[in-house]
Image: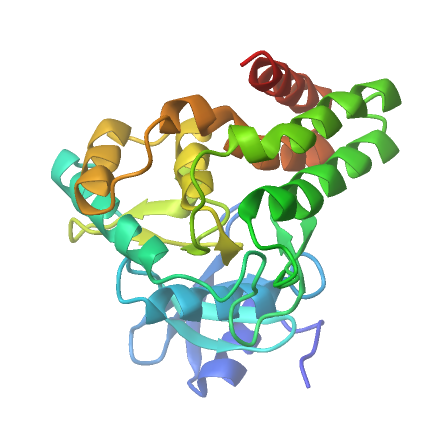
């Protein structure tokens, strides 16, 4: 049984079965721990209940697609996650193009349903420090109904509860959800999403390849991952998208749908970080309604 009073080195030793020779903590990041064979690993504590289990399952599910590389899971329990360390380099246009192609292959690996959690992952998962419900939705035959009920409205309610959104403003998002069938574009099968694909979770490896970390993996619409990359900025995004479109072209009108897909991460940020993101989400929702 895991001991919450362990330090990262003790947790790494227990979960890998190897002695530890050193540790180096960085503010706001997992701890780098050196094992007795010279290997450096990353050790991350749970931020919220279920986070470690969800992340470990997500990393393994993404790895199983044999598309975008992710750090190997070296050990975990309910409170600690140990993964390999990725030496980082600098963003590169050629690597970005390869990343786009690999991301398309990851999405094409698919998921059983919209909202499906990774195999072995909990239904009560999280995105960052916000709760995220991964409930498979076979009763929802299409993406719009699932997205509205499971990825937009729960965070609208959360933002209202925290005072970040005014109750009267919730109606704007409810109207968008009602119109999602016409705003969503052609029907798509469930894709295997990273789920929290902002630039901070894209590691540009020293070997010239991209690796993804910190997933909030689930079955969803592939354009949601692309929209999140665009929302928070990604180096050489034009090359990423070019590689993606060459491999698995998106339906016509993707640019007009970006805002609809950005509502989910914007509302998550409104719940976690305040009114500025709520105002941004409102602007995006009103623009969608004006279409």
What residue is at 58 percent from the left and 41 percent from the top?
Answer: 144
- Decide if residue 30 is in sight here: yes
What residue is at 27 percent from the left and 67 percent from the top?
Answer: 66
93 lies left or right of 177: left
- Quarter of the rendering containing residue 111: bottom left
In this rendered view, identify the residue nearer to me: 8 or 256: 256
In this rendered view, identify the residue nearer to me: 170 or 121: 170
135 lies left or right of 213: right
Residue 286 placement (x, y as % from top left)? 63, 15
Question: From the image, which quarter does the N terminus lie in?
Answer: bottom right
Labels in figure, total: 0
Q: What colour-coding does the image apply?
A: rainbow
What residue is at 37 percent from the left and 26 percent from the top?
Answer: 253
274 lies left or right of 69: right
In this rendered view, identify the residue nearer to me: 198 or 75: 198
In this rendered view, identify the residue nearer to me: 142 or 276: 142
Residue 212 placement (x, y as % from top left)? 36, 53
Q: In this view, does 114 lie above or below 90?
A: below
What residue is at 58 percent from the left and 65 percent from the top?
Answer: 54
- Quarter of the rendering containing residue 97: top left
Residue 94 placement (x, y as % from top left)? 12, 39
Residue 73 placement (x, y as % from top left)? 42, 72
In this view, which residue lies farthest toward the left? 94
């Amino acid at each position: 049984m895991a001991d919450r009073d362990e330090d990262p080195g003790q947790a790494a030793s227990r979960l890998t079965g190897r002695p530890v020779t050193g540790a180096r903590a960085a503010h706001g990041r997992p701890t780098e721990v050196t094992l007795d064979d010279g290997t450096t690993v990353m050790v991350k504590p749970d931020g919220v209940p279920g986070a470690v289990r969800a992340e470990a399952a997500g990393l393994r599910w993404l790895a199983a697609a044999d598309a975008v590389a992710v750090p190997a899971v070296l050990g975990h329990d309910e409170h600690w996650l140990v993964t390999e360390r990725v030496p980082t380099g600098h963003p590169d246009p050629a690597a970005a193009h390869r990343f786009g192609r690999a991301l398309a292959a990851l999405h094409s690996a698919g998921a059983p349903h919209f909202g499906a959690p990774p195999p072995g992952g909990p239904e009560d998962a999280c995105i960052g420090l916000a709760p995220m419900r991964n409930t498979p939705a076979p009763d929802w035959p299409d993406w719009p109904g699932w997205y509205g009920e499971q990825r937009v409205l729960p965070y609208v309610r959360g933002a209202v509860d925290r005072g970040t959104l005014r109750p009267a403003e919730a109606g704007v998002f409810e109207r968008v959800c009602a119109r999602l069938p016409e705003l969503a574009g052609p029907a798509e099968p469930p894709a295997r999403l990273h789920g929290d694909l902002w630039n901070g979770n894209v590691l540009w490896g020293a070997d010239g390849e991209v690796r993804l970390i910190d997933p909030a993996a689930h079955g969803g619409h592939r354009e949601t991952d692309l929209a999140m990359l665009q929302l928070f900025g990604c180096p050489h995004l034009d090359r990423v998208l070019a590689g993606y479109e060459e491999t698995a072209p998106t339906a016509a009108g993707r640019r007009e749908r970006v805002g609809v897909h950005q509502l989910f991460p914007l509302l998550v940020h409104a719940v976690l970080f305040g009114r500025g993101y709520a105002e941004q989400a409102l602007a995006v929702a009103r623009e969608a309604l004006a279409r």
